[in-house]
Amino acid sequence: MTNVRDMTRGSPTRLILAFSLPILATNALQQLYSLVDSLVVGNILGVTELSAVSSSGWLDWTVLSIAMGLAQGFAIQIAQSFGAKHHAELRRAVGQSLLIAAVTVVLLGAASQLLLRPVLTLMKAPAETIDMTEAYLRIIFAGLPLVMAVNVLGGFLRSVGDSRTPLIAMVFATVVNIGLDILFVSALHRVEGGAIATVCAQAVSALICFLAVRRMPLLHPSREDLRPDRAMCRRLLRLGGPIAFQNFVISVGGLVLQTVVNGYPFPFIAGYNTASRMQGLVEMAGGSLGGGVATFAGQNTGARRLDRVREGLRKSALIGFLLALTVGALIVIFGRQLLSLFMGSDERTLLLYDQVMQSGYRFLCVMAAGLPMLYLLFVYRSTLQGMGDTVIPMLSGFVELAMRIGMALLLPLLFHEWGVYIAEIAAWIGAAVLLIIGCYRRLRRMEAGTEEA
């Protein structure tokens, strides 16, 4: 168990940064192999096919983020059990997490395949791209068991302080994805090639995480741990359910926003979708910091070291703010060059190049302006989740939903295309304010002994 890290002792800043850096590298690789689909499709097939892949983003996230949210909740329980040195409870949580994950995969997989075409029609997906988007997503959704495995097993490892193994898994997955992307898209000359490559890469990542968990006896559930335990299942769902629901609610807002975007001329749709494909890259540093903060807060909450939770929160917020300013500046300076990487050289792309580039770059600049609030959102949400409060983060998802939908419907009437861009960061600001207030309120109550994790 050499990769296990106890975060209840030592410098909070050093521990959080040391733990977050492998997560950052993992997320960077994950974004890379996600972006490779767009890069290969855009350059080999063209701007129409690129828009088909890019417009799948919110619907893809709607389904996969439910699995990711549950896995985050499972990881919180395991981190708290590890911090409290309750190893029998930890193994029981591992066993029950696996049971819940298996049921979720069956139900979510069936629903995603059945509802895909009706939802795309409801979203007013452009006629030029709807069939390609459907074909791409059917393959992505078929890989849901692998996505669940990667997130659940990776969450187990990170909960006990191992953020290195998920990084190694992602390195191999990225290499596989890049090679197969080029091979399959070139050979098939269809967007489905990129989806097949992504699923194959997820299989590699899942296998590596599985082998790492097998080598860690602390994470081995017994047969008894694998028998349904209502009390532990309720506890895991109390933590993971609100996160999954929060992700779903946020996704609904994104789907509404995408529907509004689909009502604009095709060059605007293509530019917006291309820039939104890069959103994960822009958010990456803040999300990675949040991953470190969640584990730090979870272990120290389990150990009843709330003084360390508060200190870690304060220092992480400062780090997040400075990171946001840095990333925002880089996006403004190099945004056009980044967008140009996705633009192919087919005849239609060349005709629409200036309009697509203008729409995409404007969205990137607006995103850059909102990054400080987004990165603070990650820090405070992760701290709350680590302390065992997944309800306030869930409520913040409703705030995001209301702000994103309200602004997406209202602001374009006043500011036209700029209103669509601003709707996204308005959602970040509204959610961040609630999370900041809720985080300090819960921390004060836990310190006073009036509230438990």
Image (cartoon, rainbow, N blue to C red):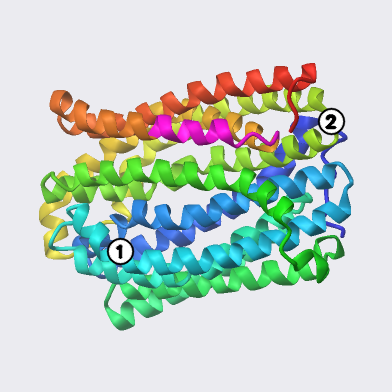
Closer to the chain start, of discs 1 and 2, is: 1
**Residue lying at 54% horizontally and 27% vertically, measured from the top left:** 376
Q: What percent of the width, then of the height, locates residue 71?
A: 61, 54
- The residue segment tinted magenta is 387-400
Residue 429 position, x and y percent, is 42, 25
Residue that numbered label 2 is attached to: 304
Query: Can you identify the residue that label 1 sits on?
Result: 116
Which image quarter holds the N terminus?
bottom right
Residue furthest to the bottom: 187
Residue 256 sits above or below residue 104 on the image: above
Q: Residue at x 75, y 20 (%)?
A: 450
Q: Main secondary structure of the magenta part?
A: helix
Q: Name the secondary structure under disc 1.
A: helix
Query: Could you say which is closer to the camera, residue 167 or residue 93?
Result: 93
367 sits left or right of 223 in the view: left
Residue type at numbered disc 1: Leu
* 223 horizontally vs 281: left or right: right
Look at the picture and state if 445 lies above or below 28.
above
Asked whether residue 89 appears in the rendered view, the answer is: yes
Q: Residue furthest front?
A: 230
Relative image position of residue 270 (x, y in whole percent): 21, 51
**Picture quadrant of residue 216:** bottom right
Q: Is residue 310 left or right of residue 438?
A: right
Examine the structure image and report whether residue 135 is included in the region drawn in magenta.
no
On the image, the x and y values in percent for residue 375 come to 52, 31
**Label 1 to label 2, Cα distance in Å?**
45 Å
